[in-house]
Image (cartoon, rainbow, N blue to C red):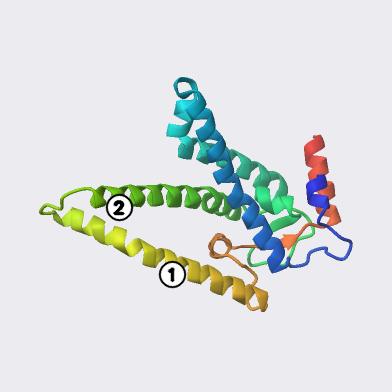
Amino acid sequence: MAEAGAHITSTAANEQPSIFEVLAQESLMEAVRPALKHAVKVLAESNPSRFGFLWRSFDELYLLLDVLLQNHFLSNCSASFSENFYGLKRVSGGRGLPVRLGLHRKSHWRSLLLLCLVPYLRAKLEATLARQRDEEDFSIRLAQSRSQRLYRAAVAAYPYVSSAWQAWIFCQQLLFVFGVTKTHSPLLWLARVKLARLNTQDIRDMELKSST
């Protein structure tokens, strides 16, 4: 538990984390996927017959590993992997900050779903849209069916939807900085949880769990 304790002070118990802490833990998690994907790509190119399946099924394999990892940390630390690394925990909404760790069952599953499934679906959608744009650039446009026109409209609308999502995130973070809201991320708001710093009792609870 040294990585969690490194960010805890005696005066930090049950306090709301700063914007720098929450953004740092997000940056850590966002860096894991590209780094692992690059490593798998190098491995697959070095020996396609043996490791090629890892590259072809990377998104699904990463989703499986992510679910196992995040579920472990949510169950034992009430936090995602990156949140626990920075000494943070998730607190179920609608109540004060607890003395001990523990998410409501619904909060646990909502957190797991949003932590793992949303990045997976976003990655698959962006890959599909990129492939569609490439196909349109090198193909002759013939008469299109209604479904094809709707699909092209969705492709054209995605950048605006993505921009609106980023604007929501920015506004949420701005409100968090000024203390208007308790969550810095729309995903936390949708999961109905908020972040707090770990305290000494939390560390004891996690050490007790790991020793049993």
Q: Which disc, if any, is residue 164? A: 1
- In the visual, does 108 lie left or right of 12? left
Res 102 seen here: no
Q: Is residue 18 left or right of residue 136?
A: right
From the viewer's perspective, tell me whether residue 187 is left or right of residue 121.
Answer: right
* Helix, strand or loop for disc 2: helix
Compute the Cα span from label 1 to label 2. Answer: 21 Å
> Between tags 1 and 2, which lies in front?
2
Q: Nearer the viewer, residue 127 or 12?
A: 127
Query: Where does residue 55 sit, x and y in percent of width and height?
Result: 46, 33
Q: In terms of sequence position, does the residue under pointer 1 or pointer 2 come before the other? A: 2
Position above or below: 167 against 211: below
Residue that sits furthest to the right in the current view:
10
Residue furthest top in the image: 49
In the picture shown, does residue 173 fall above or below 61? Answer: below
Of residue 17 and residue 99, the one placed in the foreground of this image is 17
Name the image quarter holding the C terminus.
top right
Give the residue pinned by disc 2: 133
Q: Is residue 199 visible?
A: yes
What residue appears at the point 45 percent right and 24 percent down from the top-left corner?
48
Amino acid type, residue under disc 1 in the picture: Ala
> What residue sits 71% from the left and 44% below the top?
76
The image quadrant where one finds the N terminus is top right
Instruction: Please rate how many residues cluster around mark 1, counting C-alpha atoms within 10 Å: few if below 14, some from 14 to 19, many from 20.
Output: few
Q: Residues within 10 Å of mark 2 (few under 14, many from 20)?
A: some
From the top left corner, tell me how far across and down residue 121 is, in percent: 43, 49
Q: Position of residue 165 (x, y in %)?
A: 46, 66
Proximity of marks 1 and 2: CB atoms separated by less than 8 Å: no
Residue at 51% over, 25% down: 46
Q: Position of residue 82 (x, y in %)?
A: 67, 51
Q: Amino acid at mark 2?
A: Arg
Q: Secondary structure at mark 1?
A: helix
